[in-house]
Amino acid sequence: MRNIIMDKEIVFSSRASKKSPYVFWLVLLFLIMAFGVYICGVSLTRVTVPSKPTKISFTRVERTCSINGIPPEELVYVHFPQPKTYSREECKCTPVRFFVILSMQRSGSGWFETLLNSHPNISSNGEVFSLKQRRQSMETIQRTLDTIYNLEWISSAAKNDCVAAVGFKWMLNQAVMVYHRQIANYFNQKGVSVIFLFRRNLLRRLVSLLANAYDKDAKLINGTHMSHVHTREEADLLAQFKPTLNVSSLIVDLSTAERTMMESLEFFKSNRHMILYYEDIINNPKALSDVQEFLRVPFRKLKSRQVKIHIKPLHEQVHNWYDVYSTVQGSQYEHFLHSSDYIS
């Protein structure tokens, strides 16, 4: 009897094992179908059918501007700005180069900028960062720079048509030295060329600084402060004031100005740049040709209506000349006493 029962168990087990593959496949097929129904249901819930036909808009792709004839090493300095506030129309493929004039007050930057703006293809936008809110942080500085180099800066000097070079003048004491690393990186990334404009005779620069500061209060020309003038009569009127220099700090003041110049050259040495001196513009006719070559614009004779104010020897322009002379004589700045920055 026991053997009969064991035989039945063996038979049953054998039949179950033969049916189990079919059961497995049926269960797997059911799970796949159920999963497929679930996926379809989820997809249908996410599809919305518009009640009205959707209008498809196409963006017109502007033609690529040609860069033929531009050396590969200069491509980083060539730009084709696309302002958002207006269209450059037929000038949209005029290549534009970006520049900045790094200088110090009373170093001839205003005069130099009027010379540049007499060129039909150069637009220099003035002393942009004279307003403190524009230089409060690197963020505000970059926002201002982006506006200028996208040809959307509004100024009396701006030319927004077929300009080939656009820039502005920036005094070193207007946050340039504070954010010099970030600014130098920006110039390299944007392909901005730097024109350093300095004055060799720092003693004459100091005289001009003090005279200009005096006129801010005195307003010698019809009650109006004039940093730059356009007639000889106006220039002679401003030149009548003879400032008194502080001889106790004179050497330190000259040294500080000189050190600032040298540090700026070090900070921006990685940028494409040229060094220009006020005295060279006056005495060397080729200086302005070199600037135009640097900016890659056609050569033009540049003109300015500005008239130089201080054209006399230093001893006729300083009130305490003998004290100044004895202080500077024998120092590293002795040559300032005798050199001039005017054509006699």
Image (cartoon, rainbow, N blue to C red):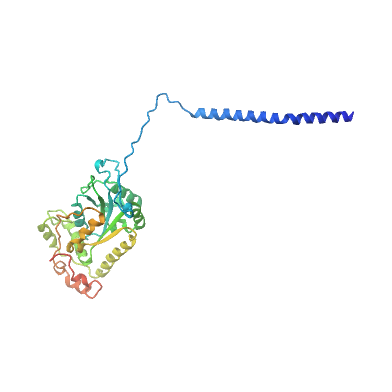
Residue 329 visible in the shown view:
yes
How many discs mark residues in the rendered view?
0
In this view, the residue farthest toward the front is 69
Above or below 130: residue 240: below
Look at the image and tell me in which quarter the N terminus lies. top right
In this view, the residue farthest toward the right is 1
Above or below 130: residue 336: below
Is residue 26 shown left or right of residue 287?
right
In this view, the residue farthest toward the top is 51
Q: Position of residue 65 (x, y in %)?
A: 30, 44
Going 13% across and 62% down the picture, which residue do you hit? 239
Q: Position of residue 184 (x, y in %)?
A: 34, 56
Look at the image and tell me in which quarter the C terminus lies. bottom left
Above or below 273: residue 330: below
Going 36% across and 55% down the picture, which residue do you hit? 185
Q: Nearer the viewer, residue 259 or 84?
A: 84
Residue 191 visible in the shown view:
no
Splitting the image into 4 quarters, where does residue 278 fall? bottom left
Is residue 4 shown left or right of residue 242?
right
In this view, the residue farthest toward the bottom is 330
Going 20% across and 57% down the picture, which residue do you hit? 112
Q: Position of residue 243 (x, y in %)?
A: 17, 65
Above or below 173: residue 322: below
Q: Nearer the viewer, residue 292 or 212?
A: 292
Q: Nearer the viewer, residue 317 or 180?
A: 180
Q: Position of residue 18 (x, y in %)?
A: 74, 30
